[in-house]
């Protein structure tokens, strides 16, 4: 066993070092590692080991706990539409569509079709939230929508498990009694966690921190995360739901950041184990035998989820937010694997169907990190302007010249505009985010709604006659597209761009940019200048 563990760590390290050279996330490396060790040590059966599954699942538990730390109860109240409206509709509509296809097209019985539909409506909490947490996209509009839908999917696991129990229960059991039992359990669980969080949590952590023992504090954090998960599991809910609620409770205390820092190492290690177990479920014999079925099923399922989620989000948000939300959630998730395995063990789903679906799900999870990495680039290339572009937008006079064009009105763009105002310099802003565009309108700024990566939008503000172009965009992919568009019109001779690192500067070198400011260099220079000023004083 020790030899297998050493080999697993070694393989994971080598694969991830190679993948990092291609800027690919470690999730893919862990999944590949799982597949390799499953064949190298004949461990395909080991993935069904109960203890291993429980250890792996705690990677998702700690992930949900740390996500909970970012979202207080007040924060979650503001997201009730994303969670309960959009999230619920997505699950119901996806389940219904898959049920109709399974039952009326393929000919699978009603119970099996319902279970398969419910399982395939879920997305991968582990992969999506881990990626978004690392890139801080969880705080962006589409990140919040993604989180809301994933929370609802986590909650939906409970009725899905109830449905499986209902389909397999003995005649003597009562459906009404099962539902009543679940409702009572939910009330007791939420009551216990709420009372503990409001009246006991902060005094407890204060007392522990006064001991000035790092070991005791870490042990207390682990107790809270695992204890809340076990409490949820005891009352019949998922581990991760209890962890998420506990994280939200701690978010209300002053210990939030310390708890998060102490828990991250445990989270990352156990998430690695989880993704290794996902990779162990890839069976090349099944892939080769049913390759055509999988090749048809994979894009069909992902396309169906995209259309449903995009349509629901588009009802109340922009096309870009809807696109990014839907594209982030087109995969099928880890809870789907658990539901299908349980249904197979209860003879609710045929073994062959179960294996085909499991392989399809795992492949969709492997593709997800690549999709998320290119999310902004895909949105920039595929999503055209929203209708707002031609409504209430600033009219630029044809003879406008010697003005500064500011591309972006986020926090950085707003700061630039304030400086231009102080200098008395004429300027025009282009902004593609509805929120920032509306802020500019409220301030009576000369602001045009549009995508600065499109040449007709740049021409609409007389960019050729401008004295300078300032690109105030912090997305590297969008920045490159915008600079390409500006280069085609002005050869970037008067374009000013800020980047975070020298690496980002090198990527832009082919675009004739003469004024690239590297933020880290400017910041370090400013800090050293302050040090020298203090010494002179």
Image (cartoon, helix red, strand yellow):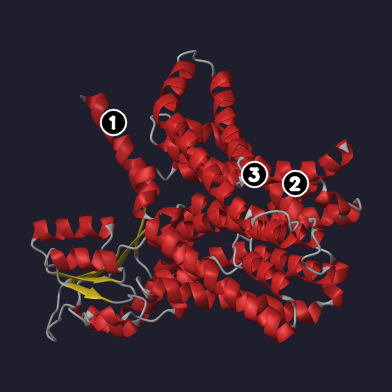
User: Residue at left 34%, top 80%?
Assistant: 385
Marks 1/3: CA distance?
47 Å
Q: x and y percent of residue 420 in the render?
A: 15, 60
Q: Residue furthest top?
A: 211
Q: Which label lies toward us, 1 or 2?
A: 2
> Which residue was labeled with disc 3?
59
Q: Nearer the viewer, mark 3 or mark 2?
A: 2
Q: Quadrant of the C terminus?
A: top left
Q: Which residue is mark 1?
A: 532
Q: What residue is rendered at 25% in x and 27% in y? A: 534
Q: Residues within 10 Å of mark 2 (few under 14, many from 20)?
A: some
Left or right of 219 in this view: 408: left
In the rendered structure, which disc, 3 or 2, sits on the residue that comes first in sequence? 2
The residue under label 2 is: 53
Q: Please rate how many residues cluster around mark 3, counting C-alpha atoms within 10 Å: few if below 14, some from 14 to 19, many from 20.
A: many
Q: How far across and down, in percent of the image, does residue 224 sit?
A: 55, 31
């Amino acid at each position: 066993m020790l030899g297998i563990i050493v080999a697993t760590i070694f393989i994971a390290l080598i694969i991830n070092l190679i993948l990092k050279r291609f800027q690919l996330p470690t999730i893919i490396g862990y999944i590949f590692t799982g597949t390799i060790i499953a064949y190298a040590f004949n461990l395909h059966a080991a993935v069904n080991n109960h203890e291993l599954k429980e250890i792996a699942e705690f990677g998702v538990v700690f992930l949900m706990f740390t996500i909970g730390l970012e979202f207080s109860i007040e924060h979650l109240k503001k997201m009730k539409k994303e969670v309960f409206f959009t999230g619920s509709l997505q699950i119901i509509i996806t389940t219904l569509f898959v049920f109709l296809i399974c039952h009326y097209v393929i000919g699978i019985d009603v119970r099996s079709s319902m279970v398969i539909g419910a399982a395939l409506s879920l997305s991968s909490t582990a992969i999506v939230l881990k990626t978004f947490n690392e890139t801080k996209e969880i705080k962006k509009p589409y990140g919040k929508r993604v989180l809301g839908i994933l929370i609802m999917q986590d909650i939906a696991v409970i009725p899905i498990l109830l449905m499986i129990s209902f389909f397999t229960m003995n005649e003597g059991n009562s459906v009404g009694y099962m539902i009543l039992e679940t409702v009572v359990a939910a009330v007791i669980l939420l009551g216990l966690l709420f009372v503990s969080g409001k009246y006991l949590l902060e005094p407890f952590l204060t007392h522990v921190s006064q001991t000035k023992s790092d070991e005791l504090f870490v042990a207390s954090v682990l107790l809270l995360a695992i204890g809340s998960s076990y409490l949820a599991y005891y009352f019949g809910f998922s581990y991760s739901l209890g962890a998420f609620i506990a994280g939200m409770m701690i978010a209300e205390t002053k210990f939030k950041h310390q708890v998060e820092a102490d828990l991250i190492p445990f989270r990352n290690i156990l998430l690695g184990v989880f993704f290794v177990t996902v990779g162990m479920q890839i069976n090349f014999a099944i892939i080769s035998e049913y390759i055509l079925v999988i090749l048809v099923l994979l894009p069909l399922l992902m396309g169906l989820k995209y259309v449903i989620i995009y349509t629901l989000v588009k009802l109340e948000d922009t096309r870009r937010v809807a696109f990014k939300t839907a594209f982030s959630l087109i995969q099928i998730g880890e809870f789907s694997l658990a539901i299908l395995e349980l249904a197979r063990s209860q003879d609710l789903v045929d073994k062959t169907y179960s294996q085909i679906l499991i392989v399809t799900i795992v492949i969709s999870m492997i593709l997800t990190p690549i999709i998320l990495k290119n999310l902004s680039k895909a949105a920039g290339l595929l999503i055209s302007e929203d209708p707002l572009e031609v409504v209430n937008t600033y009219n630029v006079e044809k003879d406008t010249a010697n003005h500064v064009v500011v591309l972006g009105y986020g926090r950085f763009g707003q700061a630039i505009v304030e400086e231009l105002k102080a200098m008395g310099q004429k300027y025009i802003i282009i902004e593609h985010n509805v929120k920032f565009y509306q802020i500019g309108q409220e301030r009576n700024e000369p602001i045009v709604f549009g995508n600065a990566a499109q040449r007709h939008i740049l021409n609409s503000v007389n960019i050729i006659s401008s004295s300078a172009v300032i690109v105030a965009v912090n997305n590297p992919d969008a920045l490159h597209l915008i600079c390409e568009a500006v280069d085609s019109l002005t050869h970037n001779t008067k374009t000013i761009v800020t980047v975070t690192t020298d690496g980002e500067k090198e990527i832009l070198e082919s675009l004739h940019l003469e004024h690239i400011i590297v933020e880290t260099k400017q910041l370090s220079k400013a800090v050293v200048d302050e040090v020298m000023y203090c010494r002179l004083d």
